[in-house]
Amino acid sequence: MPDGALYLPVNCTTTTAEDLRAGLVLAFDNPDGLVIDAGDTVVIGQAVLQLLIAAQRDAEREDIKFAIRGLNDQLTAQFAAYGIDKLTGEPSVAGIDADLSDADSQDEGTNK
């Protein structure tokens, strides 16, 4: 983690999930939040996908910044198809700053 990011391997499969889980636990101690770099990743299997979703939910619950960067187009489309595209993007509080901004705009209109 030279830049504070957790780097995913090329093939994220059940066999790499245990190492990833250990890395995620350590990464939660990063004061800059949890940034996962998937720039070299080609495959994300079910076990790793479950870990990433769980990490995002934990980050959201604990108000920790979370983002996955560098997903290729195929994986980005896969995440969108699964309805988990909130996991991607620039570091933000739990990876959902855009949603929070939209909610704030709506709240401002109703709280006047």
Image (tube, grey):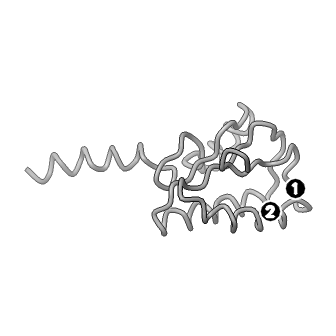
Examine the image and state in which quarter residue 23 appears: bottom right
Is residue 5 left or right of 91 when viewed as pictured?
right
Between the residue at mark 1 and the residue at mark 2, the CA separation in whole angstroms equals 7 Å
Query: Looking at the image, which is closer to me, 18 or 74?
Result: 18
Residue found at the very far top of the displayed protein: 73
Residue under the image location 56 percent in, 53 percent down: 66
The answer to whether the residues at label 1 and label 2 have Cβ atoms under 8 Å apart is yes
Callout 2: SS: helix
Q: Secondary structure at mark 1?
A: loop
Q: Earlier in the sequence, mark 1 or mark 2?
A: 1
Q: Which mark is residue 38?
A: none
Mark 1 burial class by Cα count in 10 Å: few <14, some 14-19, many 20+: some
Looking at the picture, which amino acid does disc 2 mark?
Ala
Residue under numbered circle 2: 47
Residue type at the position of mark 1:
Thr
In the rendered image, residue 81, in percent from the top left (x then y), is placed at 65, 44
Residue 24 location (% of width, % of height): 70, 63
Determine the residue positioned at 77% across, 68% down.
Answer: 22
Residue tagged 1: 13
Compared with 38, 1 (above or below) is below
- Taking the spot 78% from the left edge, 58% from the top edge, the residue there is 48
The residue at the far right in this view is: 15
